Amino acid sequence: MPIYKSDNPTKDGRAYFFKVSYKDKLCNVKKYVSKKYATKTEAKDAERKFMTNIKEKDKVPSKMTIGDLWKNWYEYQYDKVRISTRRGYAHTKKYVEPLFSVKCSDFNEFHFEEWKKLINKSNLNYISKNDKLKVLRACLNYGVKHYQLTGLLRTMSMMTKFENPGELKKEQLVYTPDEFNKFLDAEDDPRYRILWLTLYYCGLRIGEARGLQWKDINWETKTLWVNKQIQSIDNFGSNWFFCDLKTRTSNRKLSMCDALYNELKAYYDRASQYTNFNDEFFCFGKDFGVVPLVYANARLRKNAIAKKANVKQIRLHDFRHSCASLLIHSGAPITMVSKYMGHASLTETMNTYAHMLGTDLQGISELINKINEEK
């Protein structure tokens, strides 16, 4: 490449420089202009060293293992994903560790199939197994993009999902209005009553409910604002932290029905008498909300109340599905259901609740019959 001479030399007479174009590890074109040198030869030597260094950096690291790649990938992702996502990666690490000693350049279909056998021996369900596979793929894809480990592409193309031909997708368990009323009648703690009402009528995820503070309630408009969630390292009370919502569309303002509004307002009036109370307190936390709701406590309470009410046991997350069922069977448009639940897309709503929609298909034929009768 040519060496250039500047019309504006430095005070000590250096005027020669070089400029080059090259591709970085992500194949982006970069341009570099050197500092100025005293002679053309010095500039030429500097250019040669610069290009040699670039080529050395571009070499595929022959000794890099899957473990090395995982470490680099995790560090790269650290400030680019949510805290809860990072914790998911950290949890997945122990499942990927059996591959850590394998060189990236040697990783092949045999290694992958052996890894699948190990994962199949775990107690994970097939959704969780495929979640681990998804994370492994993301790590390997990072190696392809950042280290030109193109040999991984062939193996990645043969990495099939975990499947169980005999496993049918389970329909969500939900409470009908009658079942929920029986459940609610068995609950005598006002703090938990408003929790069950909020989960059932607003369809909140449990992390969203844990993050709900009194400042998020607008008494005049009868709305609550879902704008954050709380997660914990464990399912108990320690190490809780705020984090972003699952998706951008999860940030939503929801109207409260009268049943929820009345009990929530009554509880607020009582809680606001607590010493040092302020609107930063959590709606469902202990001691009128000084600390957020403990997930494990809510789950244990839910199990006890369901047993007391003699209704079926459902998960905390199934209160959210119960809300969607209530909306769908009340005739709410699926677009409204999607927005109310805070789904990222209408497709997500359809995929999640298609079985509920199916129960109303008979009404379509009845509608057509009615139209024909009117002709």
Image (cartoon, grey):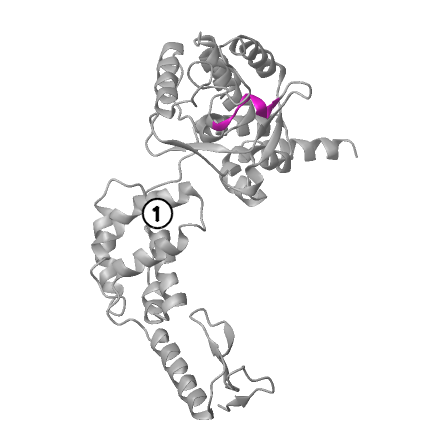
Q: Residue at x 40, y 39 (%)?
A: 169
Q: Residue 92 in the image: x percent, y percent? A: 30, 47
What element does badge 1 sit on?
A: helix
Using a 10 Å C-alpha cutoff, classify the residue at mark 1 as few (fewer than 14 neighbours), some (14 to 19) or many (20 or more): some
Relative to 349, say whether 318 is above or below. Answer: above
Residue 21, percent across and down?
A: 50, 80
User: Does residue 61 sit above or below 72 in this rendering?
Assistant: below
Quarter-of-image position of residue 334: top right
Q: Going by the image, does 256 lie left or right of 98?
A: right
Q: Amino acid at mark 1?
A: Tyr
Q: Residue at x 58, y 43 (%)?
A: 346
Q: Which residue is mark 1?
A: 89
The relative height of residue 334 versus residue 119 in the rendered view (above or below) is above
Whether residue 215 appears in magenta in the rendering, the answer is: yes
Q: Between 235 and 6, which is closer to the camera in this rendering?
A: 6
Quadrant placement of the C terminus: top right
Q: Nearer the viewer, residue 306 or 97?
A: 97
Between 132 and 222, the one lying in front of the other is 222
Left or right: residue 130 compared with residue 205: left
Q: How many marks?
A: 1
Q: Which residues are magenta?
A: 211-217
Q: Position of residue 285 (x, y in %)?
A: 44, 19
| Residue at 42% across, 26% down | 316
Q: Please indicate, yes or no, whether residue 164 appears anywhere in the rendered image.
A: no
What residue do we see at 44% from left, 48% from top?
81
Specify whether 262 is left or right of 305.
Answer: right
Of residue 242 and residue 110, the one placed in the foreground of this image is 242
| Residue 8 magenta-highlighted | no
- Asked if residue 130 can be seen in this view, the reply is yes
